[in-house]
Amino acid sequence: MPKEERSKNSRFRSQSYRKEWEKENWAQGWLKVLSQGASKAFCQFCDKNILAGKSELMRHAKTAQHCQNAAQVLGSTSMEQYVTSSQGCIKAELNTVALIARRNISFNFMSYMVPTLKHIASDSKAIKDMTSGLTKTTYLLTECLAVDAHESSGAFELKLK
């Protein structure tokens, strides 16, 4: 349940949320309306409901907690930079990472394994598109496989979204 940020004054003039604020520099990436025409907005970084007045929203954007949450969210690595468009490639990378982890092989090995696989199976589009190195391998294991993989019949089956 999101926390509520309240005004210091118990009496206040009700403000209406304006969709165009989302496009302004001070609000990009975190500001959303709770419901159309509502007097409250929602901060996605802080998971808080805020009064929809522009001054309240701008004040919230300057708080230490919001700045810390924004830095954490914006500084985190996005999955988009690691995912390719080929579903076959994603499956190949995830299964290869799962094999490496299961056999306790160093992730640095992926830097050598991927070029070798490309040489061996040059006719496979999925392998041609593979780009796993140390960073991507670590990310795929910790953010995808640790959450989405399970073992079945001695082989890994992946639940891809």
Image (tube, rainbow, N blue to C red):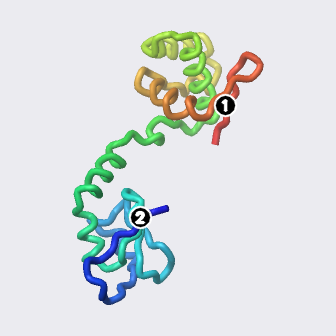
- Name the side, left or right, on which 68 lies relative to 108: left
Residue at image coords 37%, 59%: 29
Would you place residue 136 above or below residue 44 in this image?
A: above
- The answer to whether mark 1 and mark 2 are in CB contact below 8 A is no
Look at label 1 and name its amino acid. Answer: Leu
For marks 1 and 2, the one nearer the N-term is 2
Disc 1 target residue: 158
Residue at image coords 31%, 80%: 53
The image position of residue 55, as x and y in percent, is 25, 77
Q: Nearer the viewer, mark 1 or mark 2?
A: 2
Query: Residue placed farthest to the front in the image?
Result: 10
Look at label 2 and name its amino acid. Answer: Lys
Q: Secondary structure at mark 1?
A: strand
User: Disc 1 versus disc 2: distance between alpha carbons?
Assistant: 36 Å
Q: Quadrant of the C terminus?
A: top right
Q: Secondary structure at mark 2?
A: strand
The image position of residue 122, as x and y in percent, is 60, 17
- Within the image, what quadrant is residue 23 found in? bottom left
Query: What number is the disc on residue 105?
Result: none
Residue at image coords 70%, 27%: 157
Residue at image coords 34%, 70%: 5
The image position of residue 148, as x and y in percent, is 61, 34
Q: Is residue 118 visible?
A: no
Would you place residue 24 above or below residue 15 in this image?
A: above
Would you place residue 106 above or below residue 62 in this image?
A: above
Q: Is residue 151 visible?
A: yes
- Name the side, left or right, on which 115 lies relative to 22: right
Disc 2 target residue: 3
